[in-house]
Amino acid sequence: MYTIVELKGVKCGYRCGYCGNEGGKASYGMWSHTMTVQDYQDLIDRGWRRSGKYVYKPIMNKTCCPQYTIRCHALNFHPSKTHKKTLKRVNKFLSKGEMPVERCDEGHEGEPMDSVHEESVRPPPEDPQKIDHSEVQDITTSPDSDSTNSTAPTTPKEDAAPASAEKTSSVTPKPGNGADPNRPLCRKAKDIRKERRLQKEQQKQQETVSSSPNPAPSKSSSNQSKSLEEFITESLPNDPLHRLEVRLVPVSFEDPDFLASYEQSAALYARYQMTVHGDAPYECGESEFKRFLCDSPLEAETAPDGPDVGYGSFHQQYWLDGRIVAVGVLDILPSCVSSVYLYYHPDFSSLSLGTYSALREIAFTRQLQQQSPKLAYYYLGFYVHSCPKMRYKGQYRPSDLLCPETYAWVPIERCIPRLEISVYSRLNENAQAGDALALKDLGRALVLHRRTVMPYAAYARKRKGLNDEKEVEQYASLVGQTCAERILLYRA
């Protein structure tokens, strides 16, 4: 499976949803027709983010409100006093029906979604998704691909579950035939290696937690603080007045649960946008809902060492007494759960559902980590220090911000003093550090041209006189060498 993108380029001078500046925002964007979860993981670790199928990266030193990618260490997270109050408030409502009079998380409504209504953001006349991948020729290893002095670019392979043939039989062998039933079954070397790798990753995670000054306890005791999970279920009786159920449904029109709740979810989104963000009805109709929060470029994938629910895009629905009152849109990726958006019923805004859902999503990340050790982070999108309403994301600690120049993670405590001085800052304190995945060889970037996958060097020779080198070089620099050699850049 390939990731296929089409460039949309630099977009400057449009309205900023954070500060209201009519012409202060600047970003670089591309349309993703299809994308693997690993490619998207690598892209968000370079400051990219998606809105529907539109994937964009703020131009940090030009935009009025620089947006720094923020991640929380889910395993080491401990709720603050404010977080605990929110959980108690929700549990009190569920238990006794007591609704707080005033709203307690004003400003936590969420960040504005980048609009993709502009005419420039369109799929190409020929949709690459309609191309049969079996018909696509791969000439990346041919003699004409400038690979005589370098290794050919690698192409991603689709993650697959173990074949059914690998399953061991439970039938007892006849005496004298086959393996001795009293001995353990033989195991494939591949499975043994996989198990060892998982054990090592699990051990590393446990060592990280145990060495942390605030480790996340798995069980409570008299001399330990309560865990996040315990605060979530604390004080709930066996027969609460209101029943809250959290359901995870894949974003797929072939999934019966997603289809059954689609209309109710779309209506909730429209009500939220009009009430909380002041949108006009035409701005939050069913087509907009589908484009922003249901159309995802991510291909659903499973992996032997991945979570049981698999990877891809999901809606985490909060059902209160049989109706949806909130929906968190999530991407489950190899190393993280990435929060895309949240919408909820305005009548329940005093319950601080923005904070509550974030805490539930952190707990969900911790749950997934038990199944997939490397999935240990919760990404909250962008942290915008220049916008006071968006600083609440920094309260989920321990957390890191992404350096916009070296793409290294820096603890947020070390970033705040720099951001107080300047809205844009190179957060990495090491002046000698650089981008480890910086573009080194443009010729090795992959393109898709006329159903053929080829390095850019081969494409440039075929298309002599076409002056697009600067455009492709800018793209490859922003995605980095590794992604440039794996993602297919669509060229009409």
Image (spheres, rainbow, N blue to C red):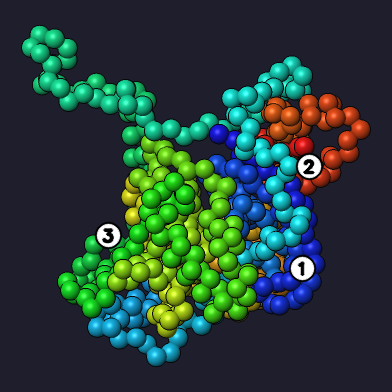
Amino acid type of disc 3? Ser
Name the residue at 81% across, 45% down.
471
The relative height of residue 232 versus residue 172 in the rendered view (above or below) is below
> Is residue 240 at all visible to an observer of this figure?
yes
Point out the residue furthest to the left here. Answer: 175
In the displayed structure image, the side of residue 89 where residue 427 appears, left or right? right
Mark 1 → mark 3, Cα distance in angstroms = 47 Å
How far from the left and from the top, in percent, is residue 313?
48, 51
Mark 1 or mark 2: whose residue is earlier in sequence:
1
Residue at left offset 21%, top offset 23%: 169
Q: Which residue is mark 1?
A: 14
Mark 1: amino acid: Tyr
Taking depth in this image into account, of 91 and 240 the one nearest to the observer is 240
Which circle marks residue 218 in the picture?
3
Of the image marks 1 and 3, the number of the one nearer the N terminus: 1
| Quarter that holds the N terminus | top right
Q: Residue at x 10, y 13 (%)?
A: 174
Neighbourhood count class around disc 1 (C-alpha, 10 Å): few under 14, some 14–19, many 20 upward = some
- First in sequence: mark 3 vs mark 2: 3
Could you give the CA–CA distance between mark 3 and mark 2, rounded to whole angstroms? Answer: 49 Å
* Residue type, label 2: Val
**Residue shown at 74% from the left, 47% from the top:** 7
In the picture, residue 175 is in which quadrant? top left
To which residue does mark 2 refer?
Answer: 472
Report which quarter residue 62 is drawn in.
Answer: bottom right
